[in-house]
Image (cartoon, coloured by chain):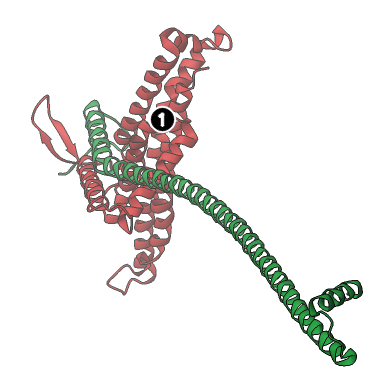
Amino acid sequence: MGDIAINGPRVLFEIPILGGLPITETMRNAWIVMLFILCLCLFLTSRMEKVPKGKQAIAEKAVQMIDNLVDGTMGPGCRGFSPYIATLLMFSFCGSLASLFFMRPVTGDLNTTLGWALITFVLIIVNNIKYKGVGGYLKGFLQPIFVMAPLNVLSEVATPVSMSFRHFGNIAGGLVITTLLLAALKALSGFVLGFLPVPLLQIGIPGVLSLYFDVFTSAMQAFIFSMLTMSYVGNARSAD
Amino acid sequence: MELFQSFVGFSPWELIVTICNTLITFLIIKKFLYKPVRKMLAQREEEVQSMYSEAENAQTEAEKLRAEYTERLAKAKEEAASITKSATHRATVRGEEILKEASQQAADMVKKAETSIEQERKKAMNEIKDEITGLSVMIASKVIEKDINEDDHKRMIEDFISKVG
């Protein structure tokens, strides 16, 4: 029964420079997901025609949907962010869904989500400074009164932290629960149906839960992360 | 022994790798999804635009042609009306002329006939006079059996006749 192990991402090997830079399972899976996204993009946009049909229609629909989402959340003139939002959506969704293919989800690693949140954080700061000026941005921390400054700074810093932990927590939580459930079902089937050579109860029940923890949560978190990025950056861009 | 990273933890190296991965994916999506799709959408929009402007041109042209044809038609109608009018006028004039000529001719003929009738009448009258004169002389000479001078008789009878007639 002591075989339940919930670990972080496995270290595949280490590059022996700077005291050993580990190549983790997360990185490998991320590269697989990137390769998949590259193939998907190439496939969807190959042999484009004037009259769209099939895969081309899907590609155009996807682009237009994300464009509309960006327009609706960030206001007009922000189409430049659309590819980045598409990147977040696809990378996050596919990275989470990797668990369906027996890979450790890419987003089940704090480094991944924190990396994205840091990009968002940088975008927020850059856009704030661009549209309000350094002084205007810093003055914003003194609103509504200067006493609030520490809290404002804290909330600003908390943005990437909360974003990354929300996404990571949801996926990692699903990972933990699925692992626990599998172990529990194995134990239960060994206890009740011990005469069978396979843990019968592991069939079916995890699939239903996986529908929630993998498919639904993946879509949900990808959407939430993108929406939050859009609204934060959109807020930063709206000069007031 | 397999090595594992901690379940909740982060390292700058892995963060950098994530950020690089994200940037690469961003470039992939931008270059291989957005660029071709945007290009295609722009192309289609351009085509629609050109089709619209073409249609508009065609409509303007048609409108122009229609105006031209209407004008031409009106002109043709006007011309036809004027032709009819002048023809009618000419016909009327010509008819009147013919009528006048005819009546003139008729009048001439009547006049000629009248003169010839008059002549005939005079001739007949003279003939009758002569005959009557001869007759009366004959009758008188027969009756009276007296030889009067024929010339005197003739004169007397002509007197008589002209008094009677």
Is A104 on the left or on the right of A130, as rendered? left
Circle 1 chain: A
Please give the name of the residue rendered at 42% of the width and 18% of the height, measured from the top-left corner: A128
Instruction: Evaluate whether residue A176 shows in this view.
Output: no
The extreme front residue here reads B147
Residue A86 against residue A155 in the figure, above or below? below
**Percent position (x, y) of residue A136?**
47, 10
Please give the name of the residue rendered at 22% of the width and 53% of the height, measured from the top-left corner: A47
Indicate the chain coloured green by its letter.
B
- Disc 1 is placed on an element classified as loop
**Percent position (x, y) of residue A102?**
26, 54
Q: Amino acid at mark 1?
A: Cys
Residue A20 against residue B116 in the figure, above or below? above
**Quarter of the rendering occupied by the N terminus of chain B:** top left
Q: Toward the viewer: B60 or A131?
A: B60
Q: Toward the viewer: A105 or A9?
A: A105
Residue B70 against residue A155 in the figure, above or below? below
**Percent position (x, y) of residue B110?**
71, 70
Q: Which residue is mark 1?
A: A78
Mark 1 closeness class: few <14, some 14–19, many ≥20 residues within 10 Å: some
Instruction: Evaluate whether residue A210 shows in this view.
Output: yes
**Quarter of the rendering occupied by the C terminus of chain B:** bottom right
Please give the name of the residue rendered at 39% of the width and 66% of the height, measured from the top-left corner: A204
Please give the name of the residue rendered at 17% of the width and 44% of the height, measured from the top-left corner: B2
Q: Toward the viewer: A209 or B114?
A: B114
**Percent position (x, y) of residue A109?**
31, 38
The extreme left residue here reads A16
Q: Toward the viewer: A124 or B31?
A: B31
Q: Colour of chain A?
A: red
Q: Quadrant of residue B120?
A: bottom right
- Total numbered circles: 1
